[in-house]
Amino acid sequence: MDFGELLKSAKLLAPSEQAKLISELLGQPKTDCLSIRKEQFFNKQANCPHCSARKYIKYGKDKGSQRFMCKACHQTFTEYTGTWLDGLQKKSRVSEYIELMMAGKSLDKISAQMGINKKTAFDWRHKILSSLTHDEGKEMEGIVESDETFFEESCKGSQILNREGRKRGNKWLGKGKRGVLDNKVAVIVTADRKGSLNLCAATMGRIGKADILRSIQSPLPEQSILCTDGHNSYKGFAMDSNLKHITLRGDMKQHVKQGVYHIQNVNSLHNRLKKWIDYTFWGVSTKYLQNYLGWFRINEKLKNSSNGQRDFINETLQDDHALKRYSYINFSYRQLLTTQV
């Protein structure tokens, strides 16, 4: 094969595979999850998972992992305690898994390529994603847009349905009900103009003021300006939070006010989110929707990153409560379903 044929073949590869080919040709070292986590602890860039202090010393070994003791709370831990790596077997293969995951490979393709069980591939995905769901919106400021979008309730993957089955794409008409139906998941998307983003599967059906408050856990600075549609719950939230509130009503053709106030950014996010969910995964189970919202958020944050894989791994390893959150997925799902009227 001459250079022209090789170049032509390379152009037929997917963008992710082209990037991988370039990386291999340049001899760039692959990102290693385990070395990143060790580096964080050895450079005192990680916190004690028990008290969040950064005063700890080496304290022997635990099944091959470095053990530490915190000088503040006197509890011991390893570099993996609380993270999605905690208790994970075959840790040496997680970097390969993340590379395939970020390349958009399906669980079937990942399990076949790595020679692991599909259930293992599924569990690893959601352990990783459980570290990305927690976003309190602490960095938001300035002009903040917020609006909700809706997803059909999905029992994808479940062996037992709590409703009558339907074919993909068919709408449940709700037997004559009007307005927002309680079989739809309300996802509140909030974003500022600097790129801070929060996505929350807030409730089933129509949202209320408490749902908005729960989705934005950290109070917005009082100098912030909240832009929303005419939903009364946003008005109540803005009043309680002492925020200036700009209302834009689509039914009155109010799309932009004073040239700067609009909710077009979150509406664009709604569109990209739904396409990503529908065409990448062919829909996702409501039970795991919040995990995928966290994945979408981090993709948006890192879309211009020069080393997306390393930055992605760094983001996942910042949360030392990921394993606990993973174990609460069923509980969180049941809580969401209790909001159905």
Image (cartoon, rainbow, N blue to C red):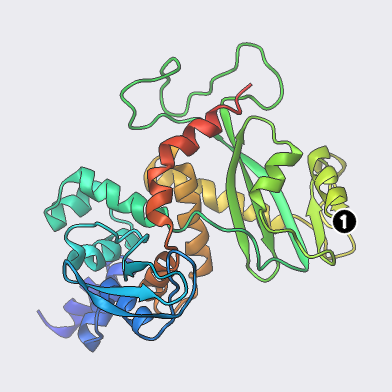
Residue depicted at 24% across the width and 50% down the height: 121
Would you call the spot at circle 1 few (<14 residues within 10 Å), some (14-19), or many (20 or more)?
Answer: some
Q: Position of residue 59 (x, y in %)?
A: 27, 77
Depth order, front residue of 174/268? 174
Question: Viewed as shown, does residue 269 lie left or right of 63?
Answer: right
Residue occupying the point 67% across, 55% down: 190
Q: Quadrant of the C terminus?
A: top right
Identify the residue position indicated by label 1 in the image.
242
Q: Residue at x 71, y 24 (%)?
A: 179
Q: Is residue 58 above or below residue 157?
A: below
Residue 297: x %, y % from top left: 52, 59
Which quadrant, please, contains the N terminus? bottom left
In the rendered structure, the answer to whether residue 125 lies left or right of residue 26 reads right
| Location of residue 80 in the rendering, given as x and y in whole percent from the top left corner | 31, 66
Picture quadrant where residue 263 is located: bottom right
User: In this rendering, would 134 be left or right of 324?
Assistant: right
**Quadrant of the rendered image containing residue 46:** bottom left
Circle 1 — which element? loop
Question: Where 205 falls versus 72 (above or below)?
Answer: above
Instruction: From the viewer's side, name the closer residue of 286 and 39.
Output: 39
Place residue 309 in its image quadrant: bottom left
The location of residue 76, given as percent across then percent down, is 34, 68
| Image: 66 above or below 154 | below
Observer-nearest residue: 115 or 49?
A: 49
Q: Amino acid at mark 1?
A: Asn
Q: Is residue 276 left or right of residue 13?
A: right
> Looking at the image, can residue 208 be seen?
yes
